Image (cartoon, grey):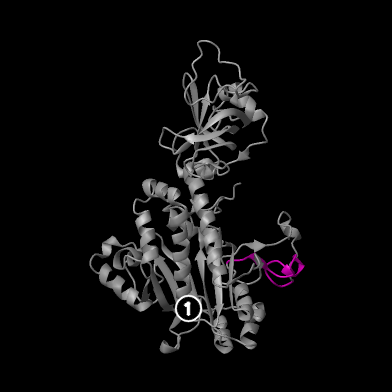
Amino acid sequence: LASAPPASAGAVRHPRAPPPSLARLHATLPAPRRVKTADALTPSPEVVSVKGWVRTVRKQKTLTFVELNDGSTLSGLQLVLPNDGLDDDGSAAAVAALTTGTSVHAVGTLVASGGKQAVELCASSLRILGGCPGETFPLAKKRHSLEYLRTIAHLRPRTNTIAAVARVRSSLAGAVHAFFQAEGFLYVQTPIVTASDCEGAGEMFRVTTLDLDDVGGIPTIEGEAGADFGADFFGKPAYLTVSGQLGGETHACALGDVYTFGPTFRAENSQTTRHLAEFNMVEPEMAFADLTSAMDNAEGMLKHAVAHILAHRKEDLEFFNKFYDKSLVERLNSLVKKPFVRCSYRDAVAHLQEEIAKDPSKWQFPVVEFGTDLATEHERWLAETKFNSAVFVYDYPASIKAFYMRDNAEDGGETVAAMDLLVPGVGELVGGSQREERLDVLLKKMAANDLDPEDYWWYLDLRRFGSVPHAGYGLGFERLVCYVTGIENIREAIAFPRYPGSAEF
């Protein structure tokens, strides 16, 4: 540096610009360490590299300011590039060609910033990795509707909202796994292709290799309607699973406590903001457990996951709190701190009847009685108005619940040991039950639901050989993402939403 030639007479170097010889010094050093923008927190004399996509470019007489984002954080990193102090290997030309969306690689040092950010990169060189023609780039620097962004789902992670959802989603998944691992649960991967309808609802996607382009050539059974699935790949009708629960029970009845976390599918022709055709379920199963055990575990898991996000995704939560739900952070803190309310279904119906009687016209579904499957408006009123808290509603009528839920002896099986967790802002988030472990009772319930025991022979074997009381629940992971981010439409909570009429990307 001492032998560097003096600057040309009359040249004025901006205070933020590196010395003219700094770039030549950089060229003699080992390749700089890459730093993600989330880790660029304090000034340092170390020469580092950053890579990402250009959000904005602001060119002045002596300096060019570039907002760079690599996806690791919401705010990104500002690059300061001196117009006359860069190295001579193409950086100046690269700066001149910068547009929003361009991917770049910059080298420099992190220095204290005079702006709103703590640090910025005083860059000595910049390379374009991938150009981005501004006239055709769909994400111009303006706010786009979430509906429009679904039409370019391959690019929408570059927006603040979807990127923040993705970061929160990733942290939530990690927190869920961490909770169950710390509690001694084993992670089990259950099949996606199944011959069993766990819910008994029949809303399943069929899996087949029969040639549907040649309908006339599909084998049939003489005298019977429909295809001969004995000639199909699996030799029987097969479907995409609606739940990993039944498979989870097999392992719980040998290993104690297990959980699944994976994709599930439902062919429900619904266009609501709360439903997807492909979604992910978190489903723990616990041996030697009852309904209270399931509620205790669900409460502990949710408090752990939400507390993790509050501690580790503050910037993203502040963004959602500002633009989507101004009570979000307060609501999440309340969930972590307050014990969940527990209310029987009969009491919930009584509370609703009393409230609806004041003005039935305010309700879309004003008729609520024993046997009513509570609607979202009922669930949200209970959580948001009646209790202002997360609330477990338990002991539901057997007539509106699945066949595998344990009959309550107290009322002769009129209700089952089932629960739903309702939370403010969303409604139902978790559904669970104590499972019916008594073989004779389970067989009667299957017959009442027109289910063939032969299709569930292995499930029934769990009751024949060393049956134990056991319980579990299912958490719709995308609904949890909606709850924690304040995003209203579940189609923004997953990378590529699948719903009726849409299977793009």
Nearest to the observer: residue 361 or residue 425: 425
- Residue at 36% from the left image edge and 75% from the top image edge: 343
The magenta segment is: 222-242
Residue 230 lies in the magenta stretch: yes
- Residue at 35% from the left image edge and 67% from the top image edge: 338
- Residue at 27% from the left image edge and 62% from the top image edge: 361
Measured from the top left, where is residue 486 in percent x and y? 41, 53
Measured from the top left, where is residue 133 in percent x and y? 58, 28
Count neighbours of disc 1 (C-alpha within 10 A) and say few if under 14, some if 14 to 19, many if 20 or more. Answer: some
Say if residue 391 shows up in the picture: yes
Q: Is residue 12 left or right of residue 26?
A: left
Say if residue 401 shows up in the picture: no
User: Residue lying furthest left in this view?
Assistant: 358
Q: Is residue 230 left or right of residue 336?
A: right
- Quarter of the figure with residue 97: top right
Secondary element type, mark 1: helix
User: Residue lying furthest front in this view?
Assistant: 2
- Quarter of the figure with residue 53: top right
